C-alpha cells in the first residue's frame, strides 16, 4: 500500500520537487509516518510552485494568470478533480486530513502580494496580513497534516507563522534591500526616524533599534506559540516544536551578530540542529 493510496509515480514526482528544492525540509519531514509525510511534501510542492511563479521577473500581467490558474486548480480539487501529480496527491491529503480550501487560497494571495508590487515599509496591518498569508496559512495546513485539526492548533499556526516570517524578514533585510524591498514595518521606521527607502534605511543609525523591536515581537510570537502547543496533541506538535526551536535559534544568532552587520550571513550550526531534533524526539 502506497502513502495516501496514491500512485507511486505521483508520489515520486512530488518527492522530487521537494528534494530538488535544496532545503532541510525534505530530510526534516522524513520522520513523519508515510501518509503524513507525503501530505506535507504535497503541501510544500504546492507552495514551491506558486512561490516560483510569484518570483518570476516577468511582468505581473503575465504572472497573475498563472497564479489564477492555481486558484482554479484548488477550486477543482475541492470539487474532486485533479489533473497532475501534485494535485492528485493533494486531493488525497485533503480528504485524509481535512485541509481547508481557504488556506491554499491564502497562500496564493500572499504570493500575489509579493508579485504585484515591490513591498517597501508596509504598515503593521499589511505586514501582519502578509505574514498570515505566506506563513500562518501554511501552518494551518501543516498542523492538520501533523495530526491536530483543533482550534488550538490553528492558534499555534497563527503565532508560529508570524514568528517564523518575522525571523525570515530580519535575516534577509540586507538581501531584500538589494532587490529594492523593505519588509520592516512603516510605523517602527518612522518612529525611529529611519528613511523608508531601502538603501537609505540600511545606512541609518536608527535601523538597529527597528530590527531589535521586530525581534522582540518575534520572541513574543514564539512564546505564544509554545503556550498554544501545550494545549494541543503532543505527538502532532513535535514537528512544530522542532521548527520553532530551529527558528528561535536562528533569531538568537541574528541577535548575537547584532543589527549593524546585516550583510554578514548567519546560520545555525549543524550540531545545534541535531541537538534540537534529539531534544524533541525527532531522531
Image (cartoon, rainbow, N blue to C red):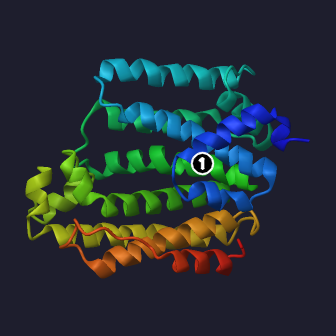
Residue 133 image position (x, y, % from top left)? 47, 43
Q: Quadrant of residue 259?
A: bottom left
Label count reads 1
Q: Which residue was labeled with disc 1?
A: 19
Q: Secondary structure at mark 1?
A: helix
Which of 231 and 203 lies nearest the eye of the viewer?
203
Q: Is residue 282 left or right of residue 249?
A: right
Vertical position of residue 13 compared to residue 39: above or below: above
Vertical position of residue 231 compared to residue 25: above or below: below
Q: Residue at x 74, y 69 (%)?
A: 234
Which of 40 and 206 lies nearest the eye of the viewer?
40
> Which residue is the extreme one toward the right?
1
Q: Quadrant of residue 277?
A: bottom right
For mark 1, does the 10 Å Cα neighbourhood hold few (<14), some (14 to 19), or many (20 or more) residues? some
Q: Residue at x 54, y 73 (%)?
A: 245
Q: Considering the image in quadrants, where does the C terminus appear?
A: bottom right
Q: Considering the image in quadrants, where does the N terminus appear?
A: top right
Amino acid at each position: 500500500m502506497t502513502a495516501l493510496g496514491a500512485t507511486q509515480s505521483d508520489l515520486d514526482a512530488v518527492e522530487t520537487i521537494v528534494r530538488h528544492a535544496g532545503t532541510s525540509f525534505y530530510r526534516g519531514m522524513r520522520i513523519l509516518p508515510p501518509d503524513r509525510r507525503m501530505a506535507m511534501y504535497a503541501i510544500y510542492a504546492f507552495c514551491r510552485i506558486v512561490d516560483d511563479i510569484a518570483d518570476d521577473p516577468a511582468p505581473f500581467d503575465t504572472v497573475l494568470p498563472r497564479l489564477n490558474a492555481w486558484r482554479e486548480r484548488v477550486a477543482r480539487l475541492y470539487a474532486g478533480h485533479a489533473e497532475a501529480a501534485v494535485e492528485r496527491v493533494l486531493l488525497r491529503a485533503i480528504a485524509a486530513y481535512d485541509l481547508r480550501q481557504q488556506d491554499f487560497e491564502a497562500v496564493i494571495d500572499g504570493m500575489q502580494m509579493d508579485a504585484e508590487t515591490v513591498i517597501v515599509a508596509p504598515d503593521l496591518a499589511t505586514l501582519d496580513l502578509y505574514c498570515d498569508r505566506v506563513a500562518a496559512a501554511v501552518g494551518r495546513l501543516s498542523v492538520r497534516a501533523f495530526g491536530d485539526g483543533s482550534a488550538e492548533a490553528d492558534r499555534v499556526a497563527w503565532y508560529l507563522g508570524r514568528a517564523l516570517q518575522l525571523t525570515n524578514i530580519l535575516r534577509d533585510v540586507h538581501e531584500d534591500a538589494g532587490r529594492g524591498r523593505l519588509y520592516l514595518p512603516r510605523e517602527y521606521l518612522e518612529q525611529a526616524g529611519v528613511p523608508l527607502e531601502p538603501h537609505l534605511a540600511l545606512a541609518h543609525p536608527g535601523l538597529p533599534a527597528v530590527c531589535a523591536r521586530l525581534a522582540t515581537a518575534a520572541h513574543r510570537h514564539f512564546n505564544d506559540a509554545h503556550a498554544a502547543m501545550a494545549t494541543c496533541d503532543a505527538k502532532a506538535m513535535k514537528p512544530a516544536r522542532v521548527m520553532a526551536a530551529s527558528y528561535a535559534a536562528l533569531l538568537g544568532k541574528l541577535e548575537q551578530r547584532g543589527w549593524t552587520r546585516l550583510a554578514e550571513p548567519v546560520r545555525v550550526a549543524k550540531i545545534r540542529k541535531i541537538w534540537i531534533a534529539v531534544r524533541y524526539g525527532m531522531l
